[in-house]
Image: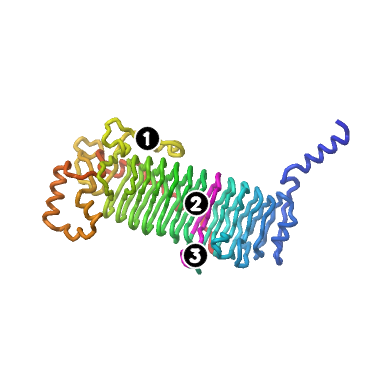
Amino acid sequence: MTSVARFLAAALLCCSGPMAGAAEIVVGPAPDALARAIATAAPGDILRLGDAAYDGPVVIDKPLTIVGGRDSRVVGKGEGTVVSVEADDVTVKNLYITGSGRRLDQLDSGVALAKGTRRARVEGNRIVMNLIGVDVQGALDATVAGNTIVGRTDLHRAEMGSGIYVWNAPGLLVEHNDIRRGRDGIFVATSAKARYRYNRMQELRFAFHSMNANDIVLEHNVSRGNALGFAFMFSRNVTAIDNLSDGDATHGLFLNSVNSSSLIHNEVREGGDKCLFVYGAVRNRIEGNRLEGCDIGIHLTGGAAENVITGNAVIGNRTQVKYVGTRWLEWSGVPEAAANDAGGSPPEPTGEAARTGRITKEPVGNYWSDHVAFDIDGDGVADSPYRPNDTVDVLTWSQPMARLLLGAPAVQLIRWAQSRFPGLLPGGVIDSHPLMSPDGTGPRPLATALTVGYAPAGEN
C-alpha cells in the first residue's frame, strides 16, 4: 500500500460513523439556545441543558442526545409540536416538555417521532399540558420509557389527544410510563409487533385502545378509574398477561373482532358495567383471569365462537354471564365449537402465550361464586355443571319490560322446572367442570405494576 493510500484509509477510518468525535456540550439559557445548539452540534454529540427554560419548538435532524437536569424545560409557543425528532438514534431524556398546539388534525405533540426514523429513545421526561404527549408516527424500533405524561385540562374530552399515539411503529417498546388525563392513555392504530408493559394510566377515556394492532404484547399494565380499561379491536395475535383494571366505569377488558389471541391472568376488580366484553371474537384463549365486582362478569355476543374459556374466577358480579343465543357453549377448557364433540380439544397456545408456560392444557372449568354445588370426591371440581342463564334471562334481555314479571309465580315455576330438567333450557353457556374455589384458577394476576418501575415525577 502506498503512503497516499494509507493516508486515505486512515482518514476514512477516523471519520466513519456518525458517532466519531462526539462531544458533550453544555447549553446555557438564552433565546433560541437549544435550536442553535442543535444546528451547530455534530452527529453523536450530547447536549446537556441546565435548570432553566429553553425555547421551543425544536427539530432534531441529526443523531443527538439531549439530556436535562432537575428543572430543564423546553417550552413551546402554543402551536405545533414542541420537540420533533427527524433523525435516527436520537435520545430525549429528563426534560420537562410543554406548550404544544391544540390541533388534532396536525397531531400537535410534546414529542413527535417522524416516519422512518429508527431507534429513538424518549426517556424519563415530564411531558405536561400538550395535546398529544408522544406521537410515534411511523418510527421504527423506538422506546418510550419512564415518562410522566399529563394531558391538557382546558379542553373537552372530544378535543383531547392521547398520552401516547402510535401508528405503524414496529419494534416499539412502551414501558414504565405514568399517563394521566386526556382521551386515551395509549392509542394504537394500524401498528404491529410492539410491547407495552408496566404502564400506569388514570383519568382517561380508554387506558389502552388499539385498532388493527397485530402481534402485540401487553403485560403488567394498570388502568385505574378510567371510563374503559383495555380495548382491543380488529386485531389478531394479541397477548395480554397480568394486566389490572381497577374501578373502570364501563368495561375492564373489551374485545371486538379479535382473533387467535390470549388473555391470561388479567384482573378486573370493582368495575362498572362489564368486566369482560367479547364481541365477534373467534379462536381466543381466555384463561386464569379474575373478573370481580361488575354488573356483568362476562358478556358474549356478536357471533363470538371457538373460544377457550378456562380457569377463570368470576366473582360477585350482579350477572355472572350474559349470552343471548340458542347454541350450547362449553366453558371448561374445550373450544365452544367442540361443545357437542367428545373429541374436541383446546387449541394449543402460540407466540407469547406459549412462551410464558402458564397455560392449562387439560380441560378445566372456571370458578363461579354463585354456583352452589357439592364436591363429594374432593377433587376441587363441582359434582354438578354450572348453567348461568335460563329462558327467563334470555326473555328479559331481549324484552326488558318482562322484568316486571320476575316475581310472578309462573316465572318462578319456569325457573324451577328448568333447574330440575336442564333439557328444557334453550341453549347457552355451560361449564361442565366448575371449580369449587378461586384458588384452583392459579395465582392471582400480578399487580406489581402499581409499585415496580419508575417513580412518577411531579407535574411542575
Disc number for residue 159:
3
Residue position for label 2: 188
Camera-side residue of 115 and 319: 115
Q: CA distance from mark 3 to mark 2?
A: 18 Å
| Residue at the (40%, 51%) spot, across then down | 244
Label 3 environment density (alpha carbons within 10 Å; few <14, some 14–19, many ≥20): some
Q: CA distance from mark 1 to mark 2?
A: 28 Å
Q: Identify the mark nearer the N-term, 3 or 2.
A: 3
Residue most extreme to the right: 3
Q: Is residue 338 above or below residue 253?
A: above
Which amino acid, mark 3? Glu
Residue most extreme to the bottom: 154
* Image coords of residue 33 (percent x, y): 71, 63
Q: CA distance from mark 1 to mark 3?
A: 43 Å
* Image coords of residue 102 (percent x, y): 55, 65
Q: Secondary structure at mark 2?
A: strand
Which quarter of the image is occupied by the C terminus?
bottom right
Which residues make up the magenta segment?
A: 156-179
Which amino acid, mark 2? Val
Q: Secondary structure at mark 1?
A: loop
Q: Secondary structure at mark 3?
A: helix
Residue 303 occupies which quadrant of the picture?
top left
Label 2 environment density (alpha carbons within 10 Å; few <14, some 14–19, many ≥20): many
Residue position for label 1: 347
Determine if the magenta segment contains residue 166. yes
